[in-house]
Amino acid sequence: MREEREISVRILTERTGFDMPLAGVFGGIPTDFLPEFDEPEEEPEEPVEESEPREGEPFPTEDTTLSGEGEEPEKSEFFAVGKLVETDDRLEIVYEESVLTGMEGSVTSIGFAKDEPNLVTMVRQGFVDTTLVFEAGKRHITIYQTPFSEFELGVYAVSVQNLLLREGVINLDYITELHGARTERCKMQIIIG
C-alpha cells in the first residue's frame, strides 16, 4: 500500500551560536553572511587523549552548550505545500525548499519507520544533497554537498519528539558540528495540516 495526500507544511526554527570561525571550513562557499571573529590567542598544547564518538554512539552530554547560547536565538518560519507519503511501514513529509531557506531547487523529505518513530531522517536532494539522521543522544555523520563544495557534517540529536501520527508535529533539538567543532544548536518544529 502507498498513499499520498497533499498537506501544508510549517517549519519553525531557532538557531543559536557559532563555536568557531567557519570561513575556512566552507572552502569556496560565499561567507559574507558569517559573523566576524577575532583570532583566539594560542595556548600551549597539552597532550590529551580523546576518543571521538563514532557514528551512532552516545555523544558526551556534559558539554552541549555553544559559545553563542544565552543570546537571543535566530528564529525563522517557513511554509510550503507538500505531500504526506505513507506506506505499510514508513511515513514521509515531502516538500520543495524555497529561496527563503537558501536551498531553492532542493526537495526535502522528512521520514521515519512506523516501528521506529524516534529515528527521524531528513533527506535533501537538488541544490543541496545530504541525509541527516536524528536519534536522541546519538551522533551521526553525513556528507553535505553543495554546488560550491562538499564537507562532513556531524549531527547530535539532543532530543527527538515525534508526534506526527497523533498531533501532526515533529520536534527536533540538535547540534551540528564541522570537523569536530560544534557550530550551531537548532530547535526545529515541523507541523503538518
Image (tube, rainbow, N blue to C red):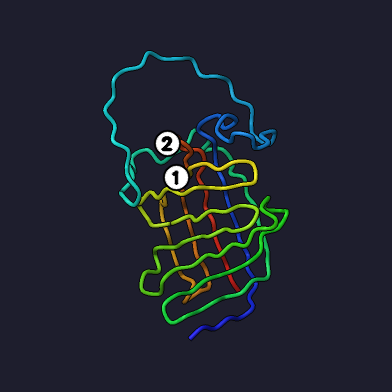
Q: Residue 29's x, y, as percent?
A: 65, 37
Return the residue nearer the eye: 149 or 82: 149
As drawn, 60 above or below 8: above
Please give left or right for residue 163 compared with residue 38 in the image.
left
Does 90 sit left or right of 96 as displayed? left
Q: Amino acid at mark 1?
A: Gly
Give residue 191's position: percent from left, percent from top.
57, 67
Q: Which residue is at the front of the view, 173 or 139?
A: 139
Instruction: Categorize mark 2 by other alpha carbons within 10 Å: few (<14), some (14-19), many (20+).
Output: few
Q: Residue at x 46, y 70 (%)?
A: 163
SS type, badge 2:
loop
The quadrant in which the C terminus is found is bottom right
Question: Which of the 4 image quadrants contains residue 181?
Answer: top left
As drawn, the residue found furthest toward the right would be: 99
Q: Position of residue 91 (x, y in %)?
A: 48, 74
Q: Are marks 1 and 2 in contact (CB under 8 Å)?
A: yes
Mark 1 Cα within 10 Å, few/some/many (few <14, many 20+)? Answer: many
Three-letter code, disc 2: Gly
6 shown above or below 143: below
Q: Label 1's element?
A: strand
In the image, 144 versus 83, the foreground residue is 144
Query: In percent of the image, x 54 and y 76: which residue is there?
Result: 85
Residue at 66 percent across and 57 percent down: it is 77
- Say which residue label 1 marks: 154
Q: Can you name the residue that lies furthest to the left here?
A: 49
Q: Tag 2 or tag 1, which sits nearer the N-term? A: 1
The residue labelled by disc 2 is 180
In front here: 109 or 18?
109
